[in-house]
Amino acid sequence: MSDPLAPERWERALVTGASSGIGLAMAELLAERGTDLVVVARDGARLERLAARLSPGAEVEVLVADLGDRDQLATAVERLGSAVSPIDLLVNNAGFGFSGDFIGLDPDGETAVVDVNIVALHRLAHAAGTAMSARGRGGILNVSSIAGYGPAPRAATYAATKAFVTSFSEALYSELGPQGVTVSCLCPGLTRTEFQQRSGSSTDRTPGFLWQSAEAVARAGLDGLDRGRAVVVPGTHNKILSTGLRLAPIRLIDQVRRRFR
């Protein structure tokens, strides 16, 4: 008799942003569970090293693409729609953001955040949802953030993109579920990845207990997807924070954020 709590046996997963952080942890955990992979990121050298490390335990296909570029995004969209070695799990993890006052940030950089965090995720989810619903089975795991639960001064664009991801995922959960496609949204808090360094965020004054490892977050996301949860917020402290962000007035949120800059 099968174990109802056992991890879902996904045959092949496409993981974006797989070269580091949560995406890398997702790829490693899926490979451990016997899932073949299509790993997507801009850094081809990192992806090749990952593929070499995970093989021969898993078949790993490397797809080098900048998802902010529409032509390169199209290659990932095409791969999701392919009937050859079909993909039954999409992990929409790629994303980034910048820290700073909105009018002081490069507008082209902010537009690039929207292109990757929203446009690419949207197009990939459409391609995956179309192919999976036709087969009557599949999974889509979109990586959002608790930052999307409220306004985020000095990270306005990033938080707004994550608000889109969460709302979009919840709608797809209802639309695609009856067609055999499970959609789940992972909303982590502070996670030890390269994100903070790349975004220019200062974390010197952030209490250590607020942080989680990329592996813990990835495991929570995959387990939540397996259990059919629409939204997964890993960690008790993040559940409390996400509730506070939904309910607190903007002035209070701003005061708290200023204390930890």
Image (cartoon, grey):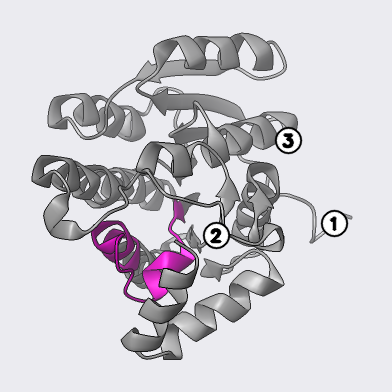
Q: Quadrant of the N terminus?
A: bottom right
Contact check, label 3 and label 2, Cβ < 8 Å: no
Determine the residue positioned at 44% across, 16% down: 62
Magenta span contains residue 191 = no
Q: Is residue 178 above or below residue 88?
A: below
- Which one is closest to the eye, mark 3 or mark 1? 3
Give the residue displayed 34% in from the left and 51% down from the top: 129
Q: Earlier in the sequence, mark 3 or mark 1?
A: 1
Residue beneath label 1, please?
Answer: 3
Task: Place residue 40 in its image quadrant.
Answer: top left
Of tags 3 and 2, which is closer to the observer? Answer: 2
Check contact, mark 2 vs mark 1: CB within 8 A.
no
Q: Residues within 10 Å of mark 1 (few under 14, many from 20)?
A: few
Front-lying residue, 254 or 162: 254
Q: Secondary structure at mark 2?
A: loop
Q: Which residues fall within the magenta stretch?
A: 142-163
Mark 2 to mark 1 CA distance (whole Å): 27 Å
Quadrant showing the C terminus: bottom left
Residue 160 shows up from this direction: yes
Q: Which residue is mark 2?
A: 188
Identified by mark 3, the residue type is Arg
Residue density around tag 3, few if under 14, some if 14–19, many if 20 or more, within 10 Å: some
- The image shows residue 79 at horizontal and vertical percentages of 33, 27
**Alpha carbon separation for disc pair 3 and 2:** 22 Å
Q: Are marks 3 and 1 in contact (CB under 8 Å)?
A: no
Q: Earlier in the sequence, mark 2 or mark 1?
A: 1
Which of the pair 107/161 is nearer the observer? 107
User: What x and y, as percent, mark residue 161?
Assistant: 28, 59
Q: In the picture provided, is 68 more to the left or to the right than 90?
A: left
Residue behind mark 3: 33
Magenta stretch contains residue 143:
yes
Q: Position of residue 5 (x, y in %)?
A: 80, 60
